[in-house]
Amino acid sequence: MSLGVAPARAGDTQTYHDPAGDTLVRKTDSCNCGPINPNWAKPDVIKVKFSKWQSPTASTDPYSGSTTSSSTARLARIDIVFDGLVCPPGPIGLTSDGYEPDRYGDGPVYGFFEIDVDDNRDTGGEIPSVAATRHLGNVGRFGSRPYGSIGNRAAVSGKDLFQPWTSHPQVCRTGADWVLAFCGCFPITVVSRSNPANGKFQPGDTWIVEGRFFQRSGGQQWASLMLGGSAPGLYDPVTRMRFSHDLSCDETTVSLVVALDQIGAGQLCGQPAEPIDLDAGNQTSIAEGIADLITGAQSRPLSGLSRELTIDWASQPLSDALDPTDWECRFIVGTTYTSASDGLYVWTDVGFGSVQGDVTGDGSVTAADRSAVLDRIAALDGGPEDGDGMVDGQVKIISYGANFDMHDVNGDGVIDQDDVELCSPPCAADFDGSGVLSAADIFAFLNAWFAGLPDADFDGQSGLGVTDIFAFLNAWFSGC
């Protein structure tokens, strides 16, 4: 998990990066003992890219085309790149299809990519039961809090889930207007396979699958008069998505092309564009989904959570939602259990805008994080939330798969000295990173300083100078 709060923009694209190999297994069943298949992939996101898109074959092959810098782009393309092989999620008992997570292969991916299309944290979100499965409800399982003001809404422990939306920290107020959902909660149809003989997704395969993957955030359901979705007020049309595994780099790219406006919707259908209406069962677009919310915010009698998540659209123009290079993204992904459990998902990766050990949400691991963990131990040690019931400098979390605590940074179910150490900032004077202060650190620093390397700007004064040498030596003699 890396901070990754500043995506790379290039006119017609915006790309978020997350490092490969940063997976951490975080179960959600109460005993933290549910079975998982060791041969299944542990989904690991390395990139999410949003593009302004155009395609001459939009109705037959929307993935063939190119990016466009046009201010009136009609389509948006979303590409999610996973390290290794992942496949569509099988059903997990949430539909009449039963429980068969590996229906499509040994790499079923579950999770949610939440998209804020208007750069407003106060529009969009979910009802509490759904929010408990999303980014703000689970990022704390990774010992981290999102950077920025949205971090104040992240669940600190399992107690923060499934509670009324008005209660702090208001996990349901995610700021996400749309979500790309791999939930195992709707039927999936395999439309095409590059190798029809492969009954399950294999290395080198490309599949097109169909389902309700791209959904407007459900917390606004009661602000909407939309029909044609899976329930009244929901805007979750059936869309087609491509899973494609590249043998050369062992990466799977999951791609979706969606319409920004009704002209783009017509292009995807190969038909004349239909006007915006209240039907999610015909031509659909981002514009149509947001126009419905603007109407609701301006003219419908709203109350409660739906009002809270929608009312800001009353004063925002539709154009705020239609530039994918301005969209913000957060995600949580993982796999699931081999058999039904009291937890749905086994999380493996989370992003963007968080770093393990940063429990204060200031963007880096500092002494404040160490103090926060120590304070948490002092507050809970020996109390009713401490499973060992003893004042012994550690807190054993009861049913820690479900009742996680953000301060359990390493996720082992105990808040203790190991977590304190993970929240301790690195020793800057250990310049060679050996873990021990020695004369070698001095030589390593001086070599960097004489070479003009930016790491040698030790006093942070934007440029190398003699003051950097004195600042380093002071730190070295002070010790770690």
Image (spheres, helix red, strand yellow):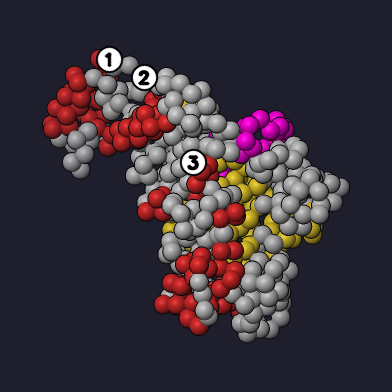
Q: Residue at x 63, y 62 (%)?
A: 214
Separation of residues labelled 3 and 2 (CA atoms): 35 Å
Q: Residue at x 64, y 37 (%)?
A: 29
Q: Tag 1: residue type?
A: Ser
Query: Residue 269 placed where, x, y %?
Result: 71, 75
Q: Element type at marker 3? A: loop
Query: Residue 434 placed where, x, y %?
Result: 36, 19
Residue nearer the viewer, 396 or 117:
396
Q: Tag 3: residue type?
A: Ser
The residue under label 3 is: 157
Furthest residue in direction right, as rendered: 197
Please give left or right for residue 193 compared with residue 141 in the image.
Answer: right
Q: Element type at marker 2? A: loop
Q: Does residue 43 appear anywhere in the picture? A: no
Q: Residue at x 52, y 26 (%)?
A: 387
Query: Mark 3 or mark 1, which is nearer the start of the sequence?
Result: 3
Query: Residue 176 placed where, x, y %?
Result: 51, 60
Q: Residue at x 53, y 52 (%)?
A: 163
> Which of the labelled discs sits on residue 186, or is there none?
none
Q: Residues within 10 Å of mark 1 (few under 14, many from 20)?
A: some
Residue nearer the viewer, 406 or 166:
166
Residues marked 1 and 2 touching at CB (< 8 Å): yes
Question: Which stretch did the figure color magenta?
Answer: 24-46
Separation of residues labelled 1 and 3 (CA atoms): 41 Å
Separation of residues labelled 1 and 2 (CA atoms): 9 Å
Q: Element type at marker 1? A: loop
The residue under label 1 is: 438
Residues marked 1 and 3 touching at CB (< 8 Å): no
Q: Name the quarter where the C terminus is drawn.
A: top left
